[in-house]
Image: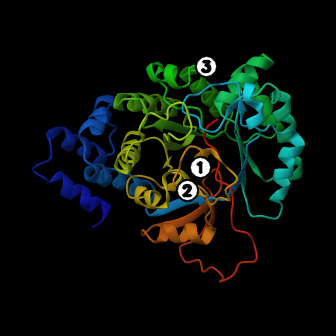
C-alpha cells in the first residue's frame, strides 16, 4: 500500500479520535500543525499512526531517496571550559591529562590523510579552549582551502563561536563574515540541546543561551551559509520542551530558510554526570523522528545517525520520516561510543551502507553537503574487491 493510500485508510478509521483525525487531515492538506497539536501527538499518538503521517510527508518531499555522504571529521580538542552534564566526551581543562589539544599543523595532517579519497566535506567540532581562538581557526580554514579548495568546510557550532567571538570582541555577524572569507562554508547543528531555560540551566548552564545559539545561525543564514539544527532528547525534558525547541527552530526557518536538516540526538547515559537518567526506548526514538518530520514542515531533511542509534534502528527510522542517515565512518570519532552507543567500534563501507538502505526498499543517494547528488546508487554494481579504502568519518554533532 502506497503512502497516500495508507493515510486515506487511516482517515477512515472510525476509532480515530477527532484530534488525531484533524491532525491527519492537516498533513494530507499540507497544513501546519500547532504547538498544542505537537504536544498532543507526543502525549497521545501511537507509533503506527505517526509512521503513516511522517512517511507520507517524507515520500512527498523525497520519494524513496535516502541520503548519505562521504566526509571526515576533525576534533581539535576534547578539553572544554564548559561543564555540560550530559557530555561523555569532553574533559574540563583542569583534567588535561585525559585529553588532547591539536595545533593547526596536526589538523592539517588529518586533512592530508584524505588526499586522493573521494570525500566532499570536513566537519570540525569538539571542545572549547582559549588557545583555539579566532586566528587559530582562521589559519586552519585558509590552509585547508589552499591545500584542497573544493573541500567543503563545515565547521564549529554556536557554542564555540559564541566563546570565540566574545573573546575577539566581534559581533556574531562580523565574526562569521571574517571566517567565511577565510574558507568557512557552513555550520553543523550541535550545541542546541534543549532550548528552554528550565532544562538548559540544568544540563548546560554555562554555555550559550538558546537566543545566542539561534542568533548565530541567523547571522550565518544572512551570509548565505546553510546550517543544520539538533535537539538532544530523552533525558529530563518533558514533551512540551521538545515542541518548544522545534517551534523556535521552525520560526527561525520561516524567517531565513537557511536550515537544511533537523537531527534529533538521543541522550546516552554512559560515563557522564547524568548516568542516573534512564535512556528512552527505540519506540520513543521512532516516535520522536516521526513527530519531528510532522512538526518541522519547513525543514527539507530529517537525519538519523546510524552510529548513535544502531543500524537496525536507522533502517526502521526510514519509515518514520527520516531521509538521511549521514554516512560511512572509520571509527575516528569517539562522541558516540564514549556515550554508550550500540556501535562501540562503528565502521561501515559504502557498499554496506548502500545495501542497508536498499534492504528496506529505499533508494540510496550519495550527496554533498548541500544535498547535490554525487552518485545515484540505485542500480550501481560494486566490484567484488575495491582497491580503495571505503571508510569515512561520521561528523561530530555536539561540542
Q: Hey, which quadrant is residue 315 in on the image?
A: bottom left
Of callouts 1 and 3, which one flags the residue occurring earlier in the amino acid sequence? 3
Residue occupying image coordinates x 68% and y 23%: 162
Q: Do labels 1 and 2 touch, CB within 8 Å?
A: yes
Question: Which dot, 1 or 3, sits closer to the camera?
Answer: 1
Residue that appears at 80% across and 29% down: 178
Residue at numbered disc 2: 343
Is 76 rendered above or below residue 302?
Answer: above
Q: Earlier in the sequence, mark 3 or mark 2?
A: 3
In terms of depth relative to the viewer, which is nearer, 119 or 102? 102
Mark 1 crowd level (few <14, some 14–19, many ≥20, 10 Å Cα): many
Q: Earlier in the sequence, mark 1 or mark 2?
A: 1
Measured along the vertical axis of the image, is residue 350 above or below residue 336? below
Mark 1 element type: helix
> Of the numbered discs in the image, which one, if any, rests on residue 206?
3
Q: Which quadrant does the C terminus fall into?
A: top right
Which percent across, then down, holds residue 37? Answer: 28, 34
Q: Circle 3 — which element?
A: loop
What is the x, y in percent for residue 65?
49, 62
Residue 149 appears in the picture as rendered: no
Density class for disc 3 (Cα within 10 Å; few <14, some 14-19, many ≥20) is few
Quadrant hosting residue 116: bottom right
Q: Position of residue 351 (x, y in %)?
A: 60, 72
Q: Is residue 27 left or right of residue 164?
A: left
Amino acid at each position: 500500500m502506497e503512502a497516500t493510500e495508507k493515510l486515506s485508510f487511516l482517515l477512515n478509521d472510525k476509532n480515530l479520535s477527532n484530534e488525531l483525525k484533524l491532525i491527519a487531515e492537516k498533513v494530507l492538506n499540507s497544513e501546519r500543525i500547532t504547538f498544542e497539536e505537537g504536544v498532543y501527538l507526543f502525549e497521545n499518538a501511537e507509533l503506527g499512526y505517526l509512521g503513516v503521517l511522517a512517511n507520507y510527508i517524507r515520500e512527498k518531499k523525497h520519494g524513496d531517496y535516502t541520503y548519505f555522504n562521504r566526509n571526515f571529521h576533525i576534533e581539535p580538542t576534547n578539553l572544554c571550559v564548559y561543564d555540560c552534564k550530559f557530555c561523555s566526551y569532553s574533559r574540563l581543562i583542569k583534567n588535561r591529562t585525559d585529553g588532547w589539544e591539536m595545533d593547526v599543523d596536526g589538523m592539517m595532517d588529518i586533512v592530508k590523510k584524505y588526499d586522493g579519497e573521494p570525500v566532499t566535506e570536513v566537519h570540525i567540532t569538539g571542545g572549547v579552549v582559549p588557545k583555539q581562538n579566532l586566528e587559530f581557526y582562521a589559519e586552519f580554514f585558509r590552509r585547508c582551502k589552499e591545500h584542497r579548495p573544493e573541500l567543503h568546510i563545515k565547521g564549529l557550532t554556536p557554542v564555540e563561536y559564541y566563546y570565540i567571538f566574545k573573546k575577539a570582541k566581534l559581533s556574531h555577524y562580523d565574526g562569521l563574515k571574517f571566517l567565511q572569507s577565510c574558507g568557512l562554508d557552513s555550520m553543523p547543528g550541535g550545541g542546541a540541546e534543549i532550548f528552554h531555560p528550565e532544562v538548559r540551566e540544568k544540563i548546560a548552564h554555562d554555555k550559550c543561551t538558546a537566543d545566542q545559539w539561534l542568533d548565530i545561525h541567523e547571522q550565518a543564514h544572512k551570509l548565505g551559509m546553510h546550517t543544520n539544527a539538533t535537539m538532544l532528547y530523552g533525558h529530563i525534558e518533558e514533551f512540551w520542551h521538545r515542541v518548544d525547541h522545534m517551534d523556535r527552530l521552525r520560526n527561525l526557518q520561516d524567517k531565513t530558510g537557511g536550515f537544511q536538516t533537523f537531527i534529533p540526538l538521543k541522550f546516552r547515559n554512559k560515563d557522564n554526570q547524568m548516568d542516573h537518567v534512564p535512556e528512552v526506548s527505540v519506540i520513543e526514538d521512532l516516535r520522536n523522528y516521526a513527530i519531528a518530520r510532522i512538526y518541522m514542515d519547513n525543514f527539507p531533511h530529517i537525519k538519523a545517525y546510524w552510529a548513535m542509534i544502531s543500524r537496525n534502528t536507522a533502517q526502521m527510522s526510514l519509515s518514520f520520516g527520516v531521509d538521511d542517515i549521514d554516512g560511512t565512518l572509520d571509527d575516528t570519532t569517539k562522541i558516540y561510543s564514549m556515550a554508550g552507543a550500540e556501535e562501540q567500534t562503528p565502521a561501515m563501507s559504502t557498499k554496506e551502507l548502500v545495501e542497508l538502505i536498499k534492504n528496506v526498499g529505499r533508494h540510496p543517494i550519495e550527496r554533498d553537503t548541500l544535498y547535490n547528488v554525487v552518485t545515484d546508487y540505485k542500480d550501481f554494481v560494486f566490484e567484488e574487491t575495491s582497491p580503495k579504502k571505503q571508510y569515512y568519518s561520521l561528523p561530530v554533532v555536539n561540542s
